[in-house]
Amino acid sequence: MMKLYFYTLLFVFIPGIVFAEDGSQLWLRYQSLPENQAKALSTVITSVACDEPSDNLAFGELQVAWRQLTGTELPVTRSVQEHSLVIGTKNSKLIQPFGLSKELQLLGNEGFIIRTMKHQGKDCLVLASEGETGVLYAVFNLLRTIQTVLPFPSSMNVKEKPAYKIRVLNHWDNPDGTIERGYAGYSLWKWKDLPGKLSPRYKEYARANASIGINGTVLNNVNASPEILSAAYLQKVKALAAVFRPYGIRVYLSVNFSSPAALGGLPTSDPLNKDVRRWWFAKAKEIYSLIPDFGGFLVKANSEGLPGPQDFGRTHADGANMLADALKPYHGIVMWRAFVYKSGMDDRAGQAYKEFLPLDGKFRSNVILQVKNGPIDFQPREPISALFGAMKHTPIMPEFQITQEYLGESNHLVFLAPLYKECLDSDTYCSGKGSTVAKVTDGTLFPNPNTAIAGVANIGEDTNWCGHHFAQANWYAFGRLAWNHELTSDQIADEWIKLTFNDKKEFVKPVKEMMLESREAAVNYMMPLGLHHLFAWGHHYGPEPWCAVEGARPDWLPSYYHKADSLGIGFNRTLSGSNSASQYNSPLREEYNDLSSCPEQLILWFHHVPWSYKMHNGLTLWEELCYTYDKGVQQVREFQKTWDRMEPYVDAQRFKEVQSRLKIQSKDAIWWKDACLLYFQTFSRQPIPFDIERPVNELDDLKKIKLNLQHHN
């Protein structure tokens, strides 16, 4: 088997010359500052004062970046000098004279202060935290400011702490190296090589996560193999944990609920069985003896055929609480996924609510329900899950998808910060107006010992980590919003562009506009107006609204969701239909139930709407559907034009690679438009408006397309 080796390449910036880049450095490129910027920076920071610099990870990161940014070395001192950068924890002898102890205590081990202060009449810049990880976060914050805020401020006063205590990536990686819904090559984790051989990319992965405040990683697929809990694999997990620990990252594992039987040889995995409980308690003790800072378990149970407590007549609470009890002595947590649905129910969108609401308040304090942003499955647009506004006595954590399972995989440029923000800023009305998903889950409205947020990772062994260069922005955006959900999509895109490419306004402005428009464009050319799950069978890459597979469950097929007929299209979830709209709090339930008040971007999610229904702009539903699909196609073509104009500002390698993906996206947008409009036209029997682009495909030809994308998984 051919071995692949990865190298971190360092490129030196020479004005007027753009060198090739492969994307391997992500947003940690530290490109040389222009002479005037470097000079201005050197007047504010002339040296660094630090305890034991040789053992200080934060100092090491600062010094490496400083060399690359300025071409100089920061002199190190053991005392505060004029214009010193003073870094350390609150216990540092250098930090103590500044009187920050009480402030830092309130910010915790991960929070930090960056403040311009005076010491014995000397101006200096102080980076301080209660813990070492907080100091590292402060250094990354400063380095981000140096590269994105121009001119560098002569005075700073920053005080931050994370919005969520646990900010975790979920890796759907399998022991054989494949990744479920992975589109950037095979897994980073080389299980066969571990624990003896450590890839240098493990450290780079940890650095990248620390730079945006991610502090946890679930190493394996939620469709978990019991093997991950074997003694041999725990030694491998221990080796990864040792690499990640200095960067403030804890490891977690997805566990298979049948592990006591499958791995331990017990005749049952019933959570109320004494031997089963004893097995889990012993397994927890074994794990923590190897990994004292192990984070806990992620569990997918009684969902899509996976085993769970319901197999034994028990509830989700019974299963989660058994695991929570085993982890509690070690301060571990259980993240119990609420992604459940059964065949034969009238509306998959309402099933999780029906299953979990009766259990509200019955979970242990170290259990968190992990709830997908929408009630179906990471669709391009969904309303928020009703569980966010229903579970008032149970900690809940949002789960977002960073990997683009339903958004063109690694071929489409779709910036997901607007999607994350749309969910986090949505009002649940669970405690009156202003009860946003963010406030429900971050401890603002319902104080909990643990608050958390998760993102399904898009990371693989591809040189640029994520397959598409712009897909890196979604990893970045998740981390930044997990740290501070009040950031705007504009702010995040602006940072990422400047860090990943350059800060030239001629480049930043148009590229940012493209990114901010890209998610809405994808909705437009895929599934506008509340349409959902029109994807092809299995791989979810392209359109197949006509999909019919013999013997398949109805809720695995697009017709279950779009319900197109001669009268209209859309899923009736109102009082006269499945009544899932009633799961939302007032005034949302009334708004969604009424066709005239339902937001048009969700109208087909909640209503079966006549083809001739008049939209707010005077167009019929059919006409609006046609114009919206066409708009999506035109938006992607504008992305192509925008990117082509950026060639002078981007290295040739990344320019051509992004350009190539945009060509694919443009073709796919036409594919989506033609497939959906030609198919739905067989029901509406109305003409496609003559002032939009004609279909270039025949419906019969589109129905013959069968992609084999197994190599992605």
Image (cartoon, helix red, strand yellow):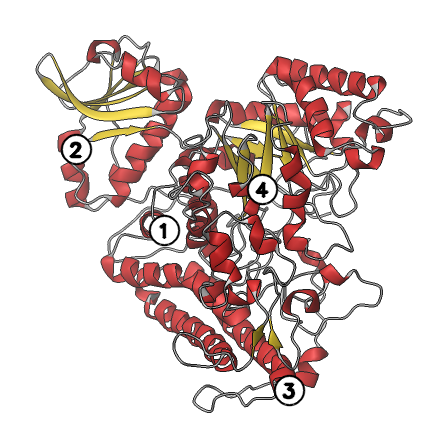
Which comes before the other along the chain, label 3 or label 1? 1
Q: Amino acid at mark 4?
A: Val
Left or right: 188 in relation to 300 = left
Residue annotated with mark 2: 42
Q: CA distance from mark 2 to mark 3?
A: 64 Å
**In the image, is residue 18 above or below residue 364?**
below
Q: Which residue, given by chain and number where applicable, does mark 4 sit on?
A: 371
Tell me the SS state at disc 4.
strand
Q: CA distance from mark 2 to mark 4?
A: 47 Å
Disc 4 versus disc 1: nearer the observer? 4
Q: Nearer the viewer, residue 349 or 143?
A: 349
Residue type at mark 1: give it: Ser
Residue at image coords 37%, 67%: 643
Gap in angstroms between the C-alphas marked 4 and 1: 22 Å
Q: Circle 1 sits on which residue?
A: 489
What is the CA distance from the residue labelled 1 to the residue labelled 2?
A: 31 Å
